[in-house]
Amino acid sequence: MSFTTQLSLIVLLCFSLLTLIRSESSSLSGREKSTYLSPAILFANYDKMIAEFKIYVYAAPKALSPTFTSSPESMFYSNLIRSEFVTRNAEEAHLFFVPFAPDTSTRALARLVREIRQSFPYWNRSLGADHFFISRAGIDYSSDRNVLELKKNSVQISCFPTKSGNFVPHKDITFPPPVDSPIELPHAPENRTTTFLGYMKLNKDDKSTWNFIDELVDDQDFLIESEPSDHKSNINTSKYCIFLYNSDMNCFVEAIAQGCVPVIIADRPIQDLPLMDVIRWSEIAVVISTRGGVKGMKLVLSEISEDRLEKMKESAVVASKNLVWNAAPEPYDAFYMVMYQLWLRRHTIRYTRREFV
Ligand SMILES: *[C@@H]1O[C@H](CO)[C@@H](O)[C@H](O)[C@H]1NC(C)=O
Ligand SMILES: *[C@@H]1O[C@H](CO)[C@@H](O)[C@H](O)[C@H]1NC(C)=O
Ligand SMILES: *[C@@H]1O[C@H](CO)[C@@H](O)[C@H](O)[C@H]1NC(C)=O
């Protein structure tokens, strides 16, 4: 083959590759491109997950048999064990699920892992790195080797927001928060007129002497509610919906779906947002610390242009379908997106114990 033929072949190849890439990305809307971190990969990889993902579920000992109370845990658990993802053939499994009840003691947990380690070859193979478990509040460090490996190597799925220290970034996952009542997902953000700059639902336990909250309550630009109320129509009154990180996030998904841009008040970096490695949260939510007080927060918000706000609302509407739990899972909903995050973690890096020191 002459040099020019080779060259033209290479050019042809590059050209067809380019058109392939172009046609793939042009099938994605602009909204999807800004909402997801890598949309082209997400959609192709999601289909692969549906077709191939296999999970082996260990039998839970009777005493530790899981009965989950909060809805994301129970919905995920019951949908998972009834799903096509579960296999009886551990040899074909990508991941291994270690189910146990939410109130399982550290001692009982250690015993459970030890039994799995002794009865099956899979734990030793990766020291638990291809294993996952559900723990609402997350598990703490322990001096027991079994629990430590579970904590450091296995993928933990807990409820958002997690307690500081109980979440290991890059590995752990959080469930999208539940919604109080079914929400209808919009197709486009509503064009609504807002009376307030921000809305916040205050919880009893937030009623601290925290200056920031007092300041907010006194500010006429904000609607702060402390009594249980119809927060759905109140979300509607405001441009932004304010959440205190590590507090009740129950109307978080409602706010996003209704185009009320979430403002999360947090004084430390947030690493445990749901679908953290799928959704481009910086295009949907604003994170503000309390340092500048309410005045500082208003300054940050005033710097967000109307144009940017519109774009954030549009991305929020796209993302809302990924955050909603359905009794029977629907494609790309909270159940399947948590599954997708597990699928992303099937090739895991393990923490190894030093055997000889
Ligand atoms: C896994 O390794 C431990 C020692 O760390 C050993 O006691 C156990 O028997 C091994 N499990 C299997 C199934 O070989
Ligand atoms: C929203 O309403 C305003 C006036 O009420 C109008 O100027 C604007 O074009 C509307 N935007 C959309 C997207 O419908
Ligand atoms: C929010 O307001 C819009 C009109 O601005 C209305 O159509 C919609 O029903 C309201 N939603 C709720 C939940 O009240």
Image (tube, rainbow, N blue to C red):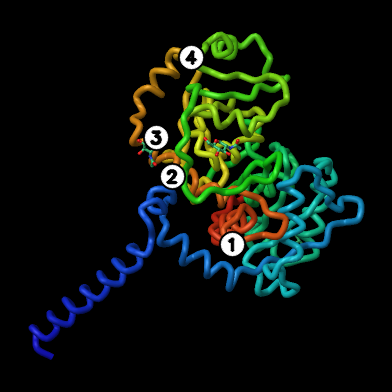
Look at mark 1 in the image and give the residue it sits on: 331
**Disc assigned to residue 309:** 3
Horizontal and vertical percent position of residue 53:
61, 68
Q: Which is nearer the N-term, disc 3 or disc 1?
A: 3
Asked if the beta carbon under badge 3 is closer than 8 A to the nearest atom of ligand 2, the reply is no
Q: Residues within 10 Å of mark 1 (few under 14, many from 20)?
A: few
Look at mark 2 in the image and give the residue it sits on: 314
SS at circle 2? helix
Between circles 3 and 4, the one closer to the viewer is 3
Q: Which is nearer the N-term, disc 3 or disc 4?
A: 4
Horizontal and vertical percent position of residue 198:
51, 23
Between circles 3 and 1, the one closer to the viewer is 3
Q: CA distance from mark 1 to mark 4?
A: 40 Å
**Disc assigned to residue 294:** 4
Answer with left or right where residue 143 lies relative to residue 268. right
Q: Is residue 138 above or below residue 209?
A: below
| Residue type beneath disc 2 | Glu
